[in-house]
Image: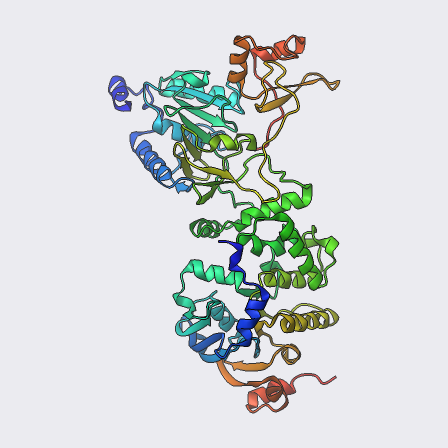
Amino acid sequence: MSADRQMNTGPDEGHYNFAYLDEQTKRMIRRAILKGIAVPGYQVPFASREMPMPYGWGTGGVQVTAAILGADDRLKVIDQGSDDTTNAVSIRNFFEKTAGVATTTRTEDATVIQTRHRIPEAPLSEEQVLVYQVPIPEPLRFLEPRETETRKMHALAEYGLMHVKLYEDIARNGHIATTYAYPVEVNDRYVMDPSPTPKFDNPKMHEMAALQLFGAGREKRIYALPPYTKVKSLDFDDHPFEVQHFDRPCGLCGAELVYLDEVILDDKGGRMFVCSDSDFCEDRRARGHVGDMAADPAAASLTGSASTSARTPE
Amino acid sequence: MTSSALPDRAEAQAAAATADEPLLKVSGVTRYYGDRIGCTDISFDLWPGEVLAIVGESGSGKTTLLNCLSTRLAPTAGAIEYRMRDGAMRNLYQLTEAERRLLMRTDWGFVHQNPAEGLRMTVSAGANVGERLMAVGNRHYGNIRDTATSWLERVEIAADRIDDQPRAFSGGMRQRLQIARNLVTHPRLVFMDEPTGGLDVSVQARLLDMLRRLVADLGLSVIIVTHDLAVARLLSHRIVVMRHGRIIETGLTDQVLDDPREPYSQLLVSSILQA
């Protein structure tokens, strides 16, 4: 697909190569992706390139997306569940310009979804690929700073240390207080950092129909979950894994059992909770669902534009 | 891995009591650093329940030998065999790396001179003690915490310090925590590198007292490296004197300390200040 595109553009210097990266680089990244798919959860080193954006803005995800994108793909980019925040808009514009692919905000229309910190609420299909932007791919890093040692621990499946972290959580807070980047065991083998998604999304990774790819640009690692892979969140027998619960539905669309963002409305304590997945929320409102605060004048500013929300830190 | 990697005390003690074979067999261990000798031609047997002290002055090869024995440093020549829990003698350097690492965190302990090397300074005392349990597959928070609490008490650390980080502990407490962390999986063999180094005399005395009790209670085999002959006299059954990388004298502790044969041993013993 990308070859056709190249022939169309030719050697004209005014154009980018299809999807920005040169073909050799894409080949190298595709090899890393294939290896990652072959060994689910294993972090494959790759020769990460400089991208025209700072580290931490999704350079890993962008490289993975560039390597798998074809001319007939439809791309969706989300940041914290939202299609219209800076990171999402910039990356979408980047691929519109460098690959000329169609883009969309609708989850079910997209063939490739690049995401930062969320998995869409709507179930994904076998025809879709989910690309995660990962800041720190090594789940053991904060407990074991030596890379040589963490690699050895992965190789020998020595994961006791991961439970030390969970133990500390319970000892300090009475429950497992890790709410994002919650470690998972993949395919009964590798322990993996699911990138800083809220742990609410961990169950969605389990046996997902779509291919999931993870790119960490600064740390130069790619890992993957093939479709229908077993993903188990780590826990203790007497402190089982639980996702966050919200005691109210979305203020705009009334959805329950979805991940909500808290939005501060004024400086007098006014606040509302809305879906973090903006496309999911819009879709529900279009189908006539109404939340209890949808009529609120403050909500009007939210329905059209980005939500400024309480965020999980990076 | 399951918790069955930990046999209960009775079984371990029974194995120790019926032992008529050495636990550790060291033959001709030599380690060169380039052309220089670290230690050379070291041979001895360690029996179950025995405490062996390796003494000698700085640079005599004590620590090199200890590192060779504990698989932290591969010897240039020689063999070290260890009797595994199933009774079979295995050459340590022919084990796979996974087996060696499992051995190190279940059947063995290593007490460093500086507790910061043996502890995780940024996690709580309870997690430090519980780490080995979690490493062998224990997944019940309540049980891990109960075990940690009882071990802290055994090493004379108040149970209400369980959630404090070792950074908040004194030197003596850190050393005791390090010992608890090593003993929690009921190891059969513990290596100690100057465990009382850097502690003041009264803290040393208390630590030695506690170590002596634990070693007797648990039937531990210990290899302890020290330059402090008083420590060797208090803890050990047998002494190996090293000089220039070689063993120059070996024997029962009181025999070597009271009636040293080699001129160098005589010098070493006579250099202790008589109180």
Residue B146 left/right relative to A126:
right
Horizontal and vertical percent position of residue A291:
62, 13
Horizontal and vertical percent position of residue B95:
40, 64
Closest to the observer, A156 or A143: A156
Horizontal and vertical percent position of residue B145:
65, 52
Q: Is residue B200 visible?
A: yes
Up-down: is B130 above or below B71?
above
Residue A246 left/right relative to A4:
right
Closest to the observer, B217 or A309: B217
Q: What is the quadrant of residue B75 in the picture? A: bottom left
**How was this image coloured?**
rainbow
Q: What is the quadrant of residue A298 in the picture? A: top right
Q: Is residue B188 visible?
A: no
Residue A1 left/right relative to A189:
left
Up-down: is A158 above or below A194?
below
Q: Quadrant of the N terminus of chain A?
A: top left
| Residue under the image location 34 percent in, 22 percent down | A16
Q: Quadrant of the C terminus of chain A?
A: top right
Q: What is the total number of numbered labels drawn onto the structure image?
A: 0
Horizontal and vertical percent position of residue A35:
34, 39
Closest to the observer, B116 or A98: B116
